[in-house]
Image (spheres, rainbow, N blue to C red):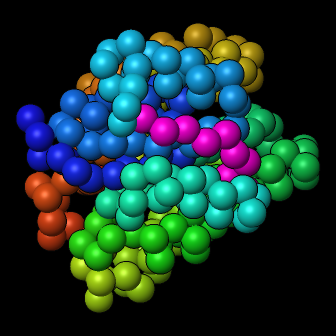
Amino acid sequence: MSDFEGQHCVLTGGAGSIGLAAARQLLARGASVHLVDRDPALLEAARQALAAEGHGERVGTSAADVSDSRQTQDYLAQAVARAGAIDFLFCNAGLNGEIVPITAYPEDVFDTVMAVNVRGTFLALKHGLPLLRDGGSVLITSSVMGVTADPGVSAYATSKHALIGLMRVAAKEVAPRGIRVNAIAPGPTTNGFQNDIERRLSDVVGRDATQMLNEAIPLHRHAQPEEIARMVVFLASAGSSFSTGGVFMADGGMHI
């Protein structure tokens, strides 16, 4: 397949499982990708993995703190210098924070989660939209917690709800340029990010959190990163050409 031939995609959180799975599928369809992540070692491991699969010439990387304005401008400039205007911007970087009641929630952790999840996406839009090709696509990673809520996750749920509002503003602002802006809302996904949440959640609820969540998901299982990535690719593609301002659930029905 070559439906992304000649297109340039920038993915924050690019070294994580969903970012990397999306990069693989975009590369397989002819795109070039620029991966952004805060951990240089994980970023290099992702680059090497993609290079070993024969995609090295179409993969760029930038180590950056997405919550920093200068570093955001730098990673976007590096992406454009390498492959030209951006066709798809995937704002996927995120933190999960703590699992404690609001009255005990650490203020510094709340601030950090909001800085990465919300400010990081705002900055990507602020500095990235002018570099996006007319007719391009933007996708923001929200969560099932962006449309629901559970006790103990005040920072994470607040940030993911906020991203949906930000997405809707952006969708209206750039519609005259033919740019589409959507949000994807994954449910529990089998990866290190979710494993960390469930390890801590198990201690809070006093039972196996993975089993508990599977019981709460109508499809009775976690997603695989590749499944989320297929939705990402659809929303980046011409297949979703009349979809903007939408929240696309990928949660196995957990929000129902």
Residue 77: x, y in percent? 57, 60
> As rendered, which of 234 and 52 lies closer to the eye?
52
Residue 131: x, y in percent? 45, 71
Residue 30: x, y in percent? 20, 39
In the figure, 187 relative to 137: above or below? above
Left or right: residue 54 compared with residue 83:
left
> As rendered, which of 69 and 208 lies closer to the eye?
69
Which quadrant would residue 170 be assigned to in this image? bottom left
The residue segment tinted magenta is: 59-67
Which quadrant would residue 180 be assigned to in this image? bottom left
> As rendered, which of 206 and 253 lies closer to the eye?
253
Q: Is residue 106 magenta?
A: no
In the figure, 215 relative to 218: above or below? above
State which quarter of the image contains the N terminus.
Answer: top left
Q: Who's the residue at 65% across and 63% down the image?
A: 73
Left or right: residue 28 compared with residue 91:
left
